[in-house]
Image (cartoon, rainbow, N blue to C red):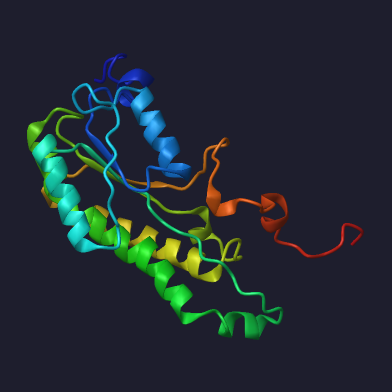
Amino acid sequence: MATSTSISAASLFDVSGVVAVVTGGGSGLGLFMTKALAANGVKKNQDTVILIQCDATDQSALKAAVAHIEAETGYINLFIANSGSVPPGSSITELQETLYNIPRQEFTNTFHMNCTAMFYTTVAFLGLLDAGNRNGSYCNGRSQVIATSSIGSFNRRISARFAYSTSKATTTIIMKVLTTYLVPYRFGRIFFVLVFPNDLTTGLYQGKNPTEEGGVSSRPDSC
């Protein structure tokens, strides 16, 4: 039977001493998560946060980042695949023209960052996550991967841009598949981060009105 200590919030969510990697940690949601982890004891030796410049869409850059971290710590316990982008939208007003005239490169770039780069970034860190498992320093050797998806991936109404919402749906299914695929390798749960913190500030939505853009009805209030 679980003891009161083992099921306490402090024990269940204790991240003291955990070695974590957050992509896109310099701004927006990634910065919020980085600060939250640092404030709760996640660290490498005496340095709380170490900045590593890396292009998540470049596999060579990913390998270099992994090699740097491996040389510094030898393992990680937590990997958060957070980097992503919201593309600018077109100004076409008619529905058919709006959808048909979405630039193909916009679709390609959005999926390249939110899906392809997320997948290869996660794969790049599997070795260090496995080392964290064998190290057994956290959660009985259960390394974890957290991917930032979006509630838009479950919404049939497009609240952002078409490419963004559908790419996040792809992000979600990729992580579901990886959840099952990694079971034999003793990885812990793979979580989906779908809720934005209330005080999140990001340049992605600067100058926009989320109240208006989040609306799903164009009917006048009098109707």
Q: Is residue 105 above or below residue 209?
A: below
Q: Is residue 101 left or right of residue 68?
A: right
Confirm whether residue 8 shows in the render: no
User: Residue lying furthest right in this view?
Assistant: 222
Q: Quadrant of residue 3?
A: top left
Residue 59 seen anywhere in this rendered image of the structure: yes
Q: In this orientation, which residue lies closer to the viewer: 172 or 125? A: 125
For the C terminus, give its image quadrant.
Answer: bottom right
User: In the picture provided, is 148 more to the left or to the right than 214?
Assistant: left
At 54% from the left and 49% from the top, the residue drawn is 203
Looking at the picture, does residue 221 appear above or below residue 1? below
Which quadrant would residue 5 be assigned to in this image?
top left
Residue at the image point whose x is 38% and y is 53% from the top? 83
x and y percentages locating residue 172 in the rendered image: 38, 58
Q: Residue at x 24, y 20 (%)?
A: 1
Q: Is residue 114 left or right of residue 15?
A: right
The total number of labels drawn is 0
